[in-house]
Image (tube, rainbow, N blue to C red):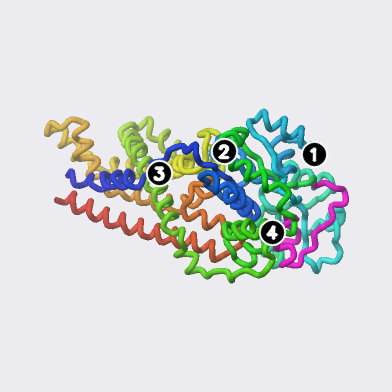
Amino acid sequence: MRAAYLPFYLLFLLVFAAAPAHALDGGTLKVGSKRFTESYILGEIVKQSAAPYVKTQHRQGLGNTAIVLAALQAGSIDVYAEYMGTIASEILKHDKPIDLEQMRRELAALGLGVAVPLGFNNTYALAVRGDEKSITNLTQLAQHPALRFGLSHEFIGRVDGWPGLAARYGLPQRPRGLDHGIAYEALAQRQVDVIDIYSTDAKIRQYGLRVLADTQQYFPRYDAMLLYRLDLPPRFPAAWQALLRLQGRISEGDMIAMNAAVEIDGKSFAGVARQWLASGMKADKSAGAARSGLLAKIIGDDLWSLTRQHVTLVLLSVALACLIGIPLGVLAAFSAPLRQAVLAFVGVLQTVPSLALLAILIPVLGMIGTVPALVALFVYALLPIVRNTCTGILQVPQGLRMAALALGLSRRDRLLHVDLPLALPVMLAGVKTAAVMSVGTATIAAFIGAGGYGERITIGLALNDNDMLLAGAIPAAVLALLTQGLFELVERWAVAGRQQ
């Protein structure tokens, strides 16, 4: 009978073998970025500028302003490129522009500072197709209520985004939420008629769009600056001096050219930043190398590191779910009054949207990365493990239990030597379900800097690059199939051991 427990022992051994030895590294300057092309590039410029003076790390593609700000306040990152209009409206919650001195005073109360204006203004705007001759400014949108708006989710929710814009211009339309990376293609395919854009987007010219004039000057200036923790300059003085040298060096034309090098020419974020720095901080506007194909992206240099991160997340989360879920399932099986409460509780946890849970966990845990991702994945893995453990034990014939007690076995011995071994096939099916689900769900971990195959997916979304999306999705699917196959073998092994 003891051979039946071997799969669980192997699972925990694999977890401890795969688990990295994480520790807070006070000697690393951690740079953050949001999930759009320009932010990735600026993050790389900041990282590479500081790299000669200190160990650096780029926590890229962290999602929207709320997530990256929570990471900054928690100390998970030290600095990232932000925009003055966003700081005033989204972070400090002002409904009107404020000057830089007021902004600094209010940020200081949060332990944050803002400095190093990079040299360009990247404001919000709305755009339509170039063949739309009847609309040239935002005021005219109110005269066309049938227009279909496809706006980014952050823009729809921002104080300085859609709500205020609709009120200022009296717009009756109801926008659809659309990821910024795919909005241009949706507009070109005539699936929507109006999208929100950044004024430095390279695709404005590529798609021949008409940017609508903001006749009532609703949008404030969005000058790019560095938002940082106030302890950064004293901790990394030489690196901070290097970052100060970026002030005023990135023109709007440079930023458009760098965005184009990534989005149109297919260059990497790091490569574009490196080229800009190496060329004396002037963007190379010449055509870049051809975009690499799907196979090259799948087997890229980062495949092993992303696989290791993804497998670690799955192993740890499923192991934790087993550690908590199996005792909960046993409790539910043997306590009828608690059964519905336990199953209902883990069922409700399963319904919490994954991104919402991740966003909640960042301020609760005070960090981004692996830990909140593990907590979220653990929550989603609980239900199948608890439910199958409970079901498997309830399916053990009552006669066998009575016979075990008649032979003098204690309730503990009966559980260990009768109930759990007989329930093992059903329990393993629950663990298998949880593991396969976790392989897919773990892709969201990239939104909070935990890595894995989701990192490629987030980049693919930002660039509207289907090959990059598939380069993340295909390895995840292969890993899910391998996980399914591995558990099929373990289940056969467990059944064979029980029959012995």
Given this view, does label 4 or label 1 mark the residue nearer the observer?
4
Comparing marks 2 and 1, which lies closer to the viewer? 2
Asked whether disc 2 touches disc 1, contact meaning CB atoms under 8 Å apart, the reply is: no
- Nearest to viewer (mark 4 / mark 3): 4
Please tell me how crowded label 2 is: few (under 14), some (14-19), or many (20+) other residues with Cα within 10 Å. some
Number of residues whose C-alpha sits closer than 10 Å to that of mark 3, classed few (under 14), some (14–19) or many (20 or more): many
- Residue numbers of the magenta segment: 192-219
* Residue 438 percent coordinates (x, y): 43, 50
Callout 4–callout 1 Cβ contact below 8 Å: no
- Judging by the rendered image, the residue that carries numbered circle 2 is 236
Alpha-carbon distance for marks 1 and 3?
A: 44 Å
- Label 3 sits on residue: 317
Q: CA distance from mark 4 to mark 3?
A: 46 Å
Q: Nearer the viewer, mark 1 or mark 3?
A: 1
Residue 142 location (% of width, % of height): 85, 53
Q: What amino acid is labelled 1 in the image?
A: Pro
Dot 4 amino acid type:
Lys
Image disc number at residue 383: none
Residue 69 part of the magenta segment = no
Dot 1: within a 10 Å radius of its alpha carbon, few (fewer than 14), some, or many (20 or more) residues? some
Q: Is residue 98 left or right of residue 388?
A: right
Q: Amino acid at mark 3?
A: Ser
- Left or right of 385, for residue 4: left
Residue 440: image location, x then y, percent: 46, 54
N-terminal-most mark, 1 or 3: 1
Residue located beneath label 4 in the image: 282
Rendered residue at 33%/50% (across/down)? 429
Q: Disc 2 residue type?
A: Phe
